Structures are given as C-alpha cells and as structure tokens.
Amino acid sequence: MQKVVFYWIVLGSILFTISHVKAQSFKVQQFRPLPNDISAFINPEYDLNHEACALLKIVCEDRFAFSTPLGIIRRKNNVGEVWLYVPHNTRLITIKHPTWGVLRDYCLPIALESRMTYELVITPPLTVQMTQFLHIDRQPTRLLHSARMTALYPDALPISDKIQTPIKLETFVSATATIGNSTLLPGIRAGIMKKHGGYLSVHTDFGNWPRNQTGICDANGYLPTEGYTPYYTGNTSSGELLVTAGAIHRLHQLWYIYEGIGYGIRRIYWECTTGEWIRYSPGSHEGWIAETGVMFRHHHYLFSGGLSTLRGTDWMGVLGIGYCF
C-alpha cells in the first residue's frame, strides 16, 4: 500500500511539473552587439532602398517565426541559430512559436545599424525548468546547441526567404546627354519616385538663335517665298531645346522603366552677306517629342539609357548618370 501511495505521489509530481512547463512561455535571455563579427559587412544584404541591412543572429530552435515593422529582408537557418537580415533602424521584433505562443513587439535595447551584427538569445520553457530544477549554472547557448534539443523539435516552420519592406519616397538628379545627328546635346533629368514616380528632363546646347531672321531656305539656299538665292557668308548658327516630362515605374529592386512626352525645337541658320539670317529648312525641326528607356540603380547611383524621337523623324539615344537622395 505504501508503494502505491509513493508511486501516485511521484506520478502527480511529474504531471504537475510537465503542466507547469507547458504553461510557461519562452523569454529573451540576452541581447548584445557583436562588434568583432563582420558577417554583415563582408556579405551584406540590401533592402528595397538598397541600403545595407543589419544582421540579427537569434540563438533558438528553428520553429520560431519573426517579424518586424520594417520587414525582414532575408532569413537563414543555421545550426542552433537563425540569421535575420533586417533594415537599418529596426527596433521592434515580434517572436512567435507554434507551441509556446507569441512575444509581440519586443523592444530591443538599441536600434540596429547597417552592416552591424547582433545576438539575441531565446530561452525556451523546457530549458528554464531544467536549469532551475537541476541548479546547473550553464550557458543557454550550449543547451540550445545540443543535439537533444534539436531532436525534440525536428519540424521547421516554413518562413518566406524574402519579405517585402516599405519603399520610401526618394528624389534623384541625373546628368544626361542625347546622341544623334552627329551632335551631343547635354541635359539634366530630375524626378521623384516610390513604386511609381515622375520626372522632368531638359536638353539644350545653349545655342544662339539670331534675332534678324528674314526667311527660310531649302537645301540649296533658295528662298521659295522670295524667289531668289541670296549670297551667303558661310557662317552658321544653331540652337536646340528639348523638354520632356513623364512617369517612372519600378520593375524590380534595382530596375526601373520610364516614358515621357514633350516638345522640341532644333534650328539652323545661314548668314547672308547683307547680315541677315536665313533658317535652313532641311536641318530645322520643331514639334512633339517622345522618349522611353530603362534605369538601373547601384547603391545611390542611377544609370539610364533610352531612345527619343522628334516628330518621329529625328532619332536620338539618351544616356545618363545620376544620384538618388
């Protein structure tokens, strides 16, 4: 009879301990920067704004799921720990487990910085109970790295490797040039963009358009309205102005396309011996202009290439290099 009572007492104690363990939730045991760890510096990950991420190494078993208000750029499961690449200035993190519950909006002691590595240690309920029961002063990291803990929780919670982060509004300025008709026309393009955006582009050669314009001649210098061919000095003057505005669309983290319409003027003048200037009709055009092209971003630098046309007759290539703010 005494043995039966003893066995019931032992069984009750075991059941009480197990239920107490299950009732407990996990907790964050430790957080610290790792200034000597250069993992985030040598192999950086970039967010959608192409800014280097911070690396948070979380010592835990791999069924944990994580989220932050700024998103998670990449998750990598390693032995005994999970690596999270998160955007710069991340401060809050939500930690979830399919059995142990949720620790929502845990506030880190400091905001995470780009290219820096940090360690976060999560202690599961079973580890806490074993440590308290056995009175063993050991590091949680060693317990979590043991093969026994891995065998207890073999299933991994599937986590998306790439999670979208908010795209911030930014501006850019590019120095551009059109190449066509044996001329190089400098210009500037400025815009603002997020997922979509807009821009304004201006190209000009700052040419001199004479004030005393008296007529228009053909390819041979003949004036159809006057009915004669004047004498020319051989001096010429030209001027060109192209203005376009349009839209920008982000196709990928680093690639954009743009399209725009506007108005363009290109004029060439011949000087007469009388001092008057005649517009050379075959080389002078005026009317609508359209353009399209692609842009590629590398860090804060922006490279572009495209094609534009003036009235569908004059075709020009457009190249540019700029900076995003």
Image: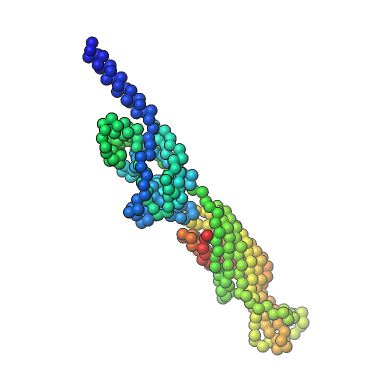
Residue 225 pos. (x, y %):
77, 79
- Report the front residue among 312 and 243: 243
Instruction: Locate residue 188 relative to residue 88 in the image: left or right.
Output: right
Quadrant of the drawing holding the N terminus: top left
- Report the front residue among 60 and 287: 60
- In the image, what residue occupies the spot 32% across and 25% down? 17
> How many numbered dots are placed on residues in this image?
0
Instruction: Locate residue 89 relative to residue 185 in the image: left or right.
Output: left
In this picture, is 236 found above or below 151?
below
Residue 195 pos. (x, y %):
55, 52
Q: Is residue 218 visible?
A: no
Residue 151 pos. (x, y %):
29, 35
- Report the front residue among 277 and 137: 137
Among the 4 quarters of the image, the one containing residue 272: bottom right
Q: Is residue 131 visible?
A: yes
- In the image, what residue occupies the spot 52% across and 51% down? 167
Extreme residue in the top direction: 1
Among the 4 quarters of the image, the one containing residue 219: bottom right
- In the image, what residue occupies the spot 68% across and 70% down? 286
In this picture, is 212 found above or below 155?
below
